[in-house]
Image (tube, coloured by chain):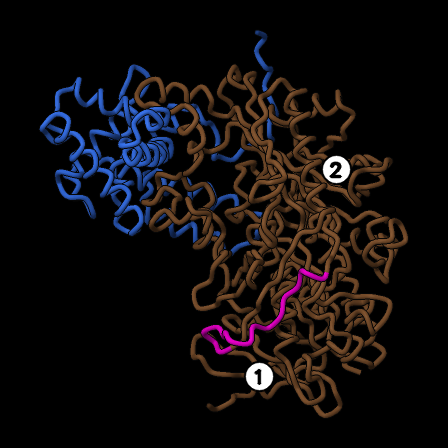
Amino acid sequence: MQVKRTPKTYDVCIIGSGASGGTAAKVLTEGGLSVALLEAGPPVLPERDYKEHVWPYDLPHRGAGIGGRARQGLDDEFLAPNGAWEIEGEPYVSAPGSKFRWFRSRIVGGRTNHWGRIALRMAPVDFKVRSHDGMGDDWPISYDDVAPYYDKVESYIGVFGSKENIPSAPDGIFLPPPKPRCTETIIKKACDHLSILCIPSRLAILTTPHNGRAACHYCAQCGRGCITASNFSSSQVMIPPAEKTGRFTMITGAMARELVIAKDGKVTAVSYIDKATREERRVHARAFIVAASACESARLLLNSRSTLFPDGLANSSGVVGRNLMDTVGSDAGGYFPQLERMPAHNHDGVGGMHMYLPWWKFDRKNDFLRGYHTEFGGGRGMPGVGDYDDLCDYVEGYGASLKKECKKKYGTFIGFAGRGEMIPNENCYCEIDPHVVDQWGIPVLRFHWKWSDNEIKMAKDMQETYRAIVEAAGGVFLGGNKIDDAHPYGIADGGVIIHEVGTVRMGERPNTSALNGYCQSYDVKNLFVTDGASFVTNADKNPTLTIMALTWRACDYLLDQAKKGNLGA
Amino acid sequence: MTISRRDILKSLTATAAMASVLRVIPLEAAQLAHKMVRAEKAAAPAQAYTPKFFSAHAYQTLQSLCNSIFPSDDESKGAVEAGAPEFIDLLTSENKDYQVSLGGGLMWLDSTCIDRYEKPYLDCTADQRKEILDLIAYRKHGKKDPSLGQGIEFFSFLRKLTADGFFTSEIGIDYLGYIGNTYVQEFPGCPPVPET
C-alpha cells in the first residue's frame, strides 16, 4: 500500500477533538502556533444532527431507535450523534471475568456533544490523597497550580453555580444558578433536615449571554446538542475560535494508528487511516498532543512500538494502560406522593440537575476512604420510551385503571445517582489484545476490571443515604440493593459512568509515571497526553473541567517553550 | 403573508451561518417547520396502514390488545388512535427477538383461546376475552397455573411497548399534562405546592 505524506510540518498535531483536544486547539492557535487536528469521526452540523425540540412522535421510532435499540440501552435516538457503547467494526474485548463497557464518540467534539455538563473542580485534598490517607498516589501538582486554569476555563466556557465555601467542593467563577424545580425543593428540605449538603449544581450551561453565546432557553435537552450553543461542547465553543485564527487544519475521518519515532527519539509524525479511502497517511509536526480519550490514548501509545520503545511509546515505566479508573456509581430512587398533587407546569429547566449533593462527610471517619457526590433528578419531564416499564410491571392489569394510574404517577419519581472516587488497583487496566484488530487493522484494547472493597462499601453508603433522604422527604424508597446482588449495592460495571481516566498518568517520578505535571512525556519530550489518561486519581468530581484545565495549563507551558525556541526540543 | 415550509428551512440554513447569538431564530423556525410537517401529515387523507411485519390477522389482534391496554375514555383517546400498533409493528419488523416474542405471543394467545373457547382470540366473546386477559395481566396467576407463564411474559412486554407508543404520542403527552419542550426566557421554578 502506498503511504501518502502530507509534506507540511505543523507546529503541533492534536489527536482528538473533545474536551481536551478542543481546548488545545483553541489555546495553541490563539497563541500563534499552526495546528493540525485529527478526529476519527465526521464533522458535527448542529442544524442537521441535533434533534433539539423534536417530539418523540416526530420520529417514526419515537426515540426507541431501529428495532427498539434504545430500550436495550444501546443508544438513544435523541442524543447528539455518534456516541455509542458499540461501534460497528471497532470492537474491544473484556478479559474473562471482567465486565467493562466503553462509550466512545467518533465525531468532532467527541463526548462533549452530549455530556452532562457537570463542571466540578477537584478540591485541594483530591490532589494529595496519599499524604491524606496513605492510599494511591499524590499528584505532582497541587490545587494552587490548577486553580488559575479552572478560572480560565470557567470564565471562557461559562459555568453556573453558587459560592458555598465547602472544602470538598471549591467555588469557581460562576454565572447565576437557575431556580430549583419542585423535585429539588423537596429533596433540599429533606437534606437540610438530615444535615446533608444540598446546593445549586455547577453545570457548563449559560444562564446569561456569555462570550457571544446566547443564554439557555430551558428546554432540558442539552444531551441532544444545543443549536444555540448555550451549553458547552468542544465542537461549538473550542473549535470555532481555533478556526478563526487561520492557523488551524481539521482532518476528520482520520483514525490515528501509530506515532512515528525519528532516530532522535522524538515523535516526527502520526500515521492515520483515512476512513473514506482506507489509505494510510501521515501528518508531520514538531510536537504532538494526544487527547483521544483516556483508553484510546493509551491504545495509541501501546500500538506505537519501535526498537527504541519496544513496550509502546512513553512507557519505560510500564504504567501505560495501568491505573484505569472509572467512577463508583450506584443509583436508587423514590416515589413521592406529594408530587401527585402538583398542577401541570413547565418543569424542564436546563438539561440536568439544578441542585446536587456535594460530598458532605469530609469532616468525619467513614467506613470507606474518599467520598462521593450525588446527582438527582426526576419529575414532569418529556415522556419517553421505557419511562413506564417499571410502573407497568408494578401496577399490572390493563385498561382504564392502568391508564389513570400512569397519569397519577407521572412526574412523581426522583432518581439518585451516587458518583464516588475509586482508588486505582492492580486488577483494573487495559492492554492490547494479542488476537483482535478493528476494521482499520489497528489492534484493539482488552480490559481487565475488578472493584475493590472500598468501592463496594461506598456504594452501600450511597444506598443507605438515599433511603434516608427519600424517607425524610415523605417518599417511598425504591432501591435497596444488597451485597450479594449481581451488582453489590447496585454498583455499576466498570466504564458505565463514562469517567475512565488514569491510563497514562502523571507523577513525580519517571519510573512510576509516564508524564510530568505538564502532561509531558518523560521519555519523549515533544509528546503530551492531555486527556483523562493523565489523571493520578479520579476524585468524585466529573473529570471534564479538570481535563480542560490541565490541557490549558499544558498548552501554556508548550507555548512558553515555543517562545523560547524549544518547541519539540 | 403565508410562509411555506421551504421558506422556513431556507431561513434555517441561512441564519445558522450567522453569528451564534442569532441562532435562537433558527430554533423558532425549526419548531415552526416541525409543526407544519405535522399539520401536513394530519391533512393528508388517511390511508389504511399496511403492517410491515404482522399478518393481517395478527395485526388486528395486536390492535385489539393495544386498545384493551390503553382504551379511549372520557379524558383522552387510546393507544390505537395514538399509533401504538404501527409503532410496535415498525420495531418488530426490525428486531428478530421481538418477532419471536410478540409474533409467538400472539400465536400463543390464539392457541390458548382455541383450547379454552374453541375460537381464536378475536372471535371470542367480550367476556371470554376479558377472562383470558384478566389471567395473563397479573404475574400472581402464573404461580397458580404455570401454563399461563408464557402468556404473562408476552402480555407484560406488550404492555410496556403499548405504554411507549401511547405516552410518546401527542395524545399521550397531552393526557399526562407534560408542558415544555419550548423556549422560555427564564425558568420560573416550582409553583406553590397545593396544601393537602
Q: How crowded is the residue under tag 2: few (<14 C-alpha within 10 Å), some, or many (20+)?
A: many
Q: Chain of mark 2?
A: A
Question: Which of label 1 and label 2 is nearer to you?
Answer: 2
Q: Note the chain letter of the brown one.
A: A
The picture quadrant where one finds residue B36 is top left
Left or right of A74: which side holds A353?
A: right
Identify which amino acid the numbered label 2 is placed on: Pro
Q: Are marks 1 and 2 in contact (CB under 8 Å)?
A: no
At 49% across and 44% down in the image, what residue appears?
B25
Where does residue B54 sit, x and y in percent of width and height?
Answer: 19, 44
- Part of the protein shown in magenta: A426-441
A463 w.r.t. A189: above or below: below
Left or right of B181: which side holds B40?
A: left
The picture quadrant where one finds residue A23 is bottom right
Q: Would you say residue A435 sits in the magenta stretch?
A: yes
Is label 1 in a helix, a strand or a loop?
A: strand
